[in-house]
Each structure stands twice: as C-alpha cells, then as structure tokens.
Amino acid sequence: MKYRHSHPINILEHTSRFLILLFLPILRAVWELLQETPDFYEWLAGAWMDLVTCLCILALGTIAWYRYEYCFTDTGIDMRKGLFLVKRRFLPYRKLSVVSVEHPFYLRPFGAVRVAADTDGGTFNREDFKATMHQEDVILFLQQTSLPFTDLSEMKRVYLPKNIYIAILSFISSNSLAGVLFVSTLISGAGKLLGEWFEEMLMDQITTLLRILAFGIPPAAAGLAFLILGGWLVSFLQNLIRHLRFSVTRQGEQLQIQSGLITRREYRVMIQRINLIELRQSLITKIFGFYSAFIHANGYGKRKDELSVLMPSCEKEDLSLNIQLLLPEIPFCTPTVRPKLKYLSRFLMPSLCWIGGVAAAWALAVRFFGSYSDLIHYIGVMLEIPCVWYLLVRIVSFFHTGVGEREDAYTFRYTYGYRIKTVAVPKKRIVKVSVRRDPFQIMTGCCKLVVLTYSEGLKRHVIPNLDYEEVKRIMGYQRYCK
C-alpha cells in the first residue's frame, strides 16, 4: 500500500486563519525594509517577533500536512494522522454516499483540487474524508470510489437543463440576507487591506448614491429598500454563476452531477444512499407551473451556500420524464389523504393574525409618533406585503397539502414558510412517524402528521390538518391506534 500526502498548498489552507492576523504587520515590515535607506538591524529588532511567529505557524502546518496520509486500497480509503498519537480511519467504498470534487480557480495554477467523501455516519457539518490533492491523485480517487457503483457497459442517461431554468432556480433560492452579508464582508475586508480611509470613502459614495436615487422617499426607507434589493441581486448572481453549466449523468448505481462557471464542481451520488427527492416551488413558480428538484444524500449540499440540486427547474411534463430517467427508484404519486374543507380556517388563521397584528402596530405607531408618519407608513406597507403574501401561500397550501402512497415510497405535500414542497421518501428511509393533536384538533377530528427521515441529522416533515382516521390508515397506524 502506498500512502500519499495532500498537495503542499494544504499547508497554507491549514494556517491561513492564523496568518491573516499577521498579514498587515508583515506587510508593514516588508514595506519598511524596502525604503531607500533601511536600517536592517533596526528593522529586524521591530519585526523579529512577527517573523518568528509566522515561521512557527508555518512549521506546525507543515508537520500537520506531513503526518496526514491516505491510501486508496481495493476496498476503501485508509487514513492516518498524528505526530505522537497516530489515529487511523477506514472508509469502505460501498458505504460512501457522496464523493465531491471542487476545482477552485485560484488553485488551478498550482494543479491542486479539493476532494471530499461522505457516508451516512459522521457529523452533520464535517466530511468523513477531505483533502486537497494533486490532479493525478484525483483521477485515481474517482476511479476507486466509483468502481463498486458504476457499470461501464450500461448506457449513460444525461440531463442538461436550459440556462433559463438555472436562472429560475437562482431567482427562487436567492436570499437578501446572504447577499448583504457577502457585500458587508467584502467591504470590511477591503477596509482591512486598503485602510479605513477606503472603507469610509466607499460608504460615503454609497450614501450619496442612495440620496440621488431616493426620489422623495425618506433616506432611511430608501436605504432599507436598496439594501434588500441589492442583497438579493448579489445572491442571485452568486447562485447563477455557481449553477451554470449544470448537468446530471446516470450510469449504474451512481449520479454524476456537475456545475459551476468559474469554480467547477463535481459530485458522485450513490443511488442507494439517497434519502428523498424534494420538489420546491414558490408562489410565483407554482402559478407558472415550474418545479425545482433537490435530493437529500449525506455530503451533497453540506457546505455553506451549497444546494443539493437534481433539476434546477422544469415544467410538470418534463419533471415526470426526467425523474423516470434519473431516479425511477423513488416515485411520486398523487395524494389520497387531503385536508377537508372544514379545516380551511386552520390554514388561514396564522397569516390573518400576522396581518391584523402588523396593522394594529402600524396604527398605534402613527398615533403616538405622528411626526414620523411618512417613514411609519412606508415601513407598515413593507411589513404588510410579506404578511399578505403569506396569506396567499396558506390558501395554496390548503389545496396542495396531502399524503400519498405508492409501492415502497410515500409522497408528502406541505408548505414550510413561503416554500411549497412535495417530497418522495422511500419507506426504508423513514425512522419515525408521530401523530400530534391538540384539544381543538381532537374536537374537529384532525391531526398533524410529523415524519422524520434518515440522515446524519434528522430531517423533519410536518403535514398539518389532516383527517385523523385517514392518517392512521395510510401510515399503518390502524392496528396500533384505537
């Protein structure tokens, strides 16, 4: 067995979070050294501590890199690490759920590639195997990990979505908060590197631009509106760039998913480890008949800002064909248990309470702070819009919610916040089913169905306001619940 080391760039990856603290002092020290008449001994007296600390950090990173080794055996990945106390781990290929390969653009000149492998065990936020490899090692890694699942004699089935469908996915999955955090981090980082004067100058220019574009709206209100819109736009562009050139290939018992315009990503998902298929819609895509399909498999969609996409977006006819093409093992079906009309008020009451609560707070704010009425009216309208939108989602939820059963899988239809979901789950992946009833539900004969599905962290599905007797029948509760 030949043990291998990760790419030497991994030394900097391990120590980067410490070196960044010393970046500015070292930069300042180098700048002083490059002056026209530097005094070397005086410079060394002021900079030696920073240099020694930096060298120590690099030395520790080098030791950690050298003592982490891995080997691709015929049956799995053998890993060992540690200087004095050596720890060993072994991941069998047949137990892998997802293998991922990432080609960051800034690592390409060094011939370095990030890889990871995950199983159904381990922790929710950390991969079971992770390394930055040489390009030639990646080829061997993919060959070995795919061998138990790929039948080379089987025909490949390929799904290639149109770019407009990728844009729809980016539209419905974009988040204003994520975009705002990205921009604020970018501005703050630029301020640290270029100086506080640059950060202050940039913020002054943004403030001036907001005043020009306000068009009579109070500056604070205009700033809030542009902050939300700008954050959403940044998030949209991030998602779009991340998922362009998307494709899915099915061969044997494995899905190969590729995406990315600047940084290319590839995922090998093992069919038998897929926990469920989830269709998501917003109110707008529901009206126009578009679906986005996601899968749940440990290791896919695990990293920050990563989505576990199977199909970015498609219409209902294409959806059925593509699911049959890629994952016929997990079928969808129409619901046979639906909410009754008498339960409609239970769907609408939460959103109506929100609308009434915001309206009451709006009226009280105008009464006691009338001098700020323009700003209060603007904020009131901005708060009522999502409440009314939520009411429309809840109306759709009444007609959408339900449970269906087919062969070895269930289909659960429900809403979560503003998302409209349809989930197909193999019965063997369900780990717990509970039926919950409050006193009012007991009087009306309805219940809340809660289903937990298999994963590193349990995934929860809540289907509300269904008939109690029908739920017992379809979920196999009849002989247990009297």
Image: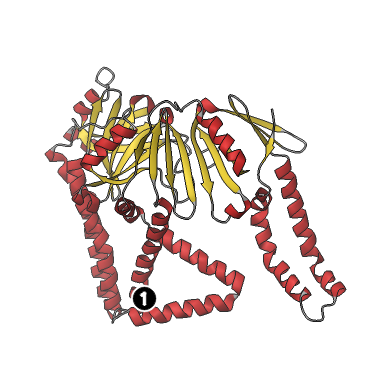
Q: Is residue 320 visible?
A: yes
Please state if 149 lies on the left or on the right of 213 as rendered: right
Picture quadrant where residue 344 is located: top left
Residue 57 in percent (x, y) is at 74, 54
Left or right? Give the position of 312 relative to 287: right
Q: Residue at x 30, y 51 (%)?
A: 165
- As drawn, the residue found furthest toward the left would be 341
Q: Position of residue 37 (x, y in %)?
A: 82, 81
Crowd tier of the residue under label 1, counting other residues whose Cα lies within 10 Å: few below 14, some 14–19, many 20 or above: few
Q: Quadrant of the N terminus?
A: top right
Residue 268: percent from the left, percent from the top? 46, 36
Left or right of 68? Residue 219 is left
Q: Kindly indicate the quadrant of the structure image that contains residue 430.
A: top left
Residue denoted by label 1: 220
Question: Is residue 304 placed above or below 295 in the rendered structure?
Answer: below
Asked if one can make out residue 369 in the rendered structure from this viewpoint, the answer is no
Q: Quadrant of the C terminus?
A: top left
Q: Amino acid at mark 1?
A: Ala
